[in-house]
Amino acid sequence: MQESLLTPEPYVKVALPVPMRTLFEYKVPKAIALRHKLIPGMRLKVPFGKQTRLGLIVELCYQSEWNPNQIKPFTSLHDEAAILPQTIIDLCKWASRYYHHPIGEVFFHSLPAMLRKGESDSYRSEVWWVLTDTGNHLQLDELKRAPKQHAFMEIVKAHPNGLSPHIMRLHDLQGSVAKALEDKGFIRRDLRHFSKNAEHHGHKKQVPPTLNHEQDIAVTKLSSQLGQFNVALLDGITGSGKTEVYLRLIEHAIEKEQQVLVLVPEIGLTPQTLKRFEDRFNTDIALLHSNMSDRERLDGWLMARSGKARIIIGTRSSIFVPAPQLSLIILDEEHDASYKQQDGFRFHTRDLAIMRAKSINACVILGSATPSYESLHNAKQQKFDWIKLRSRAGSAEIPSMERIDLRGQTLIKGFSEASLERINTHLSRKEQVLVFLNRRGYAPTLMCHDCGWISQCPNCDVNLTVHKKANKLHCHHCGYQSALLHQCGECHSHEVFTIGEGTEQVEAQLVSLFKDIPVLRIDRDSTSRKDSLNAITQKIHEQDKAILVGTQMLAKGHHFPNVTLVVVMDADVGLFSSDFRGMERTAQLITQVAGRAGRASKPGHVLLQTYHPDHPSIESLCSLGYEFFANQGLQERKSLELPPYLHQILIRSESVDDDQAYLLLDQLRKEAEQHIENFNYPIQLLGPYSAIIVRKAGQHRYILTFKSFNRAPLHQLISLLSQSLEQNPLTRKVRYAIDVDPLETY
Ligand code: ADP
Ligand code: ZN
Ligand code: ZN
């Protein structure tokens, strides 16, 4: 009955990569409706304005709010089957609603770049070379006068399964030689798909260590939950063997032919970590991170989608990768800020992981030595299971922390005498020392002695950082660079000098203080070239005594067994931060860096250089540890009515025109006040206020904050405002962004 009322051809609702909060409707051309079964997740070409664009079918519907005569038919179908499964379509829809982000942009963000551009969803095919019968019987001596062909044949014979492009590259073999041998009938080509080639396993699996008591409890509990929705916070101190717990759970999942998604922070995937996974499992591992080519990423994505890759390791955006057998999602270092995308589509990977797991009955494990206050709060509320690992795995001990009082001391190149003495002691025992300073470059400020001028970025309200080796001034906010000035920009005096120090300077000072000791620097500048981080860590492992200097890059995931002393140059950085998350971040960073000390058999020590040794934060972190510190922090957040006790959404505006950027939010505030009054929303407003760095990359920036103890009205209000923002003519000159559960509020 119902069916006869429906129009014979349905409409498709299509996601397009445009900044509009809507799906677009198209008619299905008759010829296509007859031949194809349309389903959500297929790509298609549609007319859009004067262009034809690639879109994705999100829904089919039989009724439209629009006049049917106004709806255009779409141009052509791009796929024979859906490229995205329904679970990912649902996840994108949820994300678009929760983050108030244009739905088409969310869908296109979720896809690998090549699929966004219209590439087919199939593996790359490669030409492999295989020996023919003739080739097999050939006496190699016959090729004596053609040494290149001789060499090629030798290598083909050594690879009875065929010669892959990869092996050809390794041996520097040329296609022209292959062609010549093909013409002679000695070899033939075989076109193979990338996925087949990945089956190169067969190494002996590494024998895992015996779990300690805490690990054993964790594994038993968590493995019983595979296949049902559950979120667990694995709160284990650095070196407590969290990764070992992950590996055991992955083993359980693989035995049941399930898939596991392992999420790592932006720069958290060290070659050491990957090697631990590869050594343990005889299975395909799909990698998805930003340091890969688009083609490699698509191949990895396809391996995950086919179910072939049992383990998928990736950064933030891989939360959207299809994986039909997914039963476990692990977020390693769950507190890491890189899980939140800070521009464009501002999603938090943790939230999406939980939503996704809920919809497919999977488990989520959030692992960290320094859990975020949000996750600790959820664990305390019993929304998450809370599993603690409080001792170090193997024979390693927990490092001791000590404050070094800098007040009234004469510093020697940024170090107190006591710190230098301790560095010497550890070096003399052939151990390594790690010096931590979260500021790269040579110095953060260049100043004129005669007139007080300071070199500033022309595009931002910040000082330029001095990079001495590169002989440049850099803006770390917009990327601006200029030649290093040796003369004042104002009065042309030659008396210019630097204030403060960065890692480049500390490195230079350590080299002059500790002659003959290798000093290795790890920060974004020293590791900008591909594989340079690898080379440096390799060197660290080869040395006995050495000093490592670095930024937060050093805090993540590395295991340097010979580091026994960590010196934190400036433990006070977070104390007076304008962001309420400042102290949480500093405590996490210090604890993580401290965790690099004494990870093997030798005990570790940590020195915190501070001008505020009696500050309650420094004191509690130092003597009572992160858990106690975080508890105190949560109490404070509660009394000050801050997240996680209260929910926030920000709307940010930016424009080259200062007044207009302010005006947009001012109008929005008035509109919000009206809604709040009409609907009696329990929402507080703050702003518009200017961002701390008011001007960044030439844009003047303002913020309007919405706060509520209750999420629902907050989201209702933002929905209303986002609709009106889309219509607001000011947005032609002012860019805006909605930031739900912001991590940065300035
Ligand atoms: P985390 O991820 O918590 O920092 P890891 O899993 O990296 O800790 O473990 C730290 C070190 O201890 C690693 O070298 C690891 O191989 C080792 N380890 C882990 N579990 C055990 C165990 N049960 N027995 C012996 N060594 C272990
Ligand atoms: Zn001057
Ligand atoms: Zn700048």
Image (cartoon, rainbow, N blue to C red):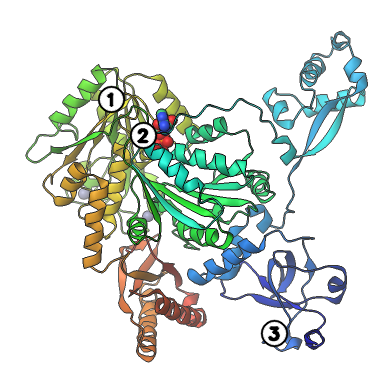
Which mark sits nearer the N-terminus, 3 or 1?
3
The amino acid at mark 1 is Val
Circle 1 — which element? helix
Mark 2 Cα within 10 Å, few/some/many (few <14, many 20+)?
Answer: few
Observer able to see residue 686: yes
Q: Residues within 10 Å of mark 1 (few under 14, many from 20)?
A: some
Query: Which residue is tagged 3?
Result: 64
Residue at (79% x, 17% y) in the render: 148
Q: Residue at x 27, y 49 (%)?
A: 627
Q: Nearer the viewer, residue 345 or 646?
A: 646
The residue under label 2 is: 469
Whether the residues at callouts 1 and 2 have beta carbons within 8 Å, the answer is no
Check disc 2 and give the amino acid type.
Lys
Inter-mark Cα distance, 1 to 2: 14 Å
Residue that label 1 marks: 511
Q: Quadrant of the C terminus?
A: bottom left
Residue type beneath disc 3: Ser
The mark lying in front, picked from 1 and 2, is: 1
x%, y% of residue 640?
Answer: 22, 67
Q: On screen, 189 above or below 387?
A: above
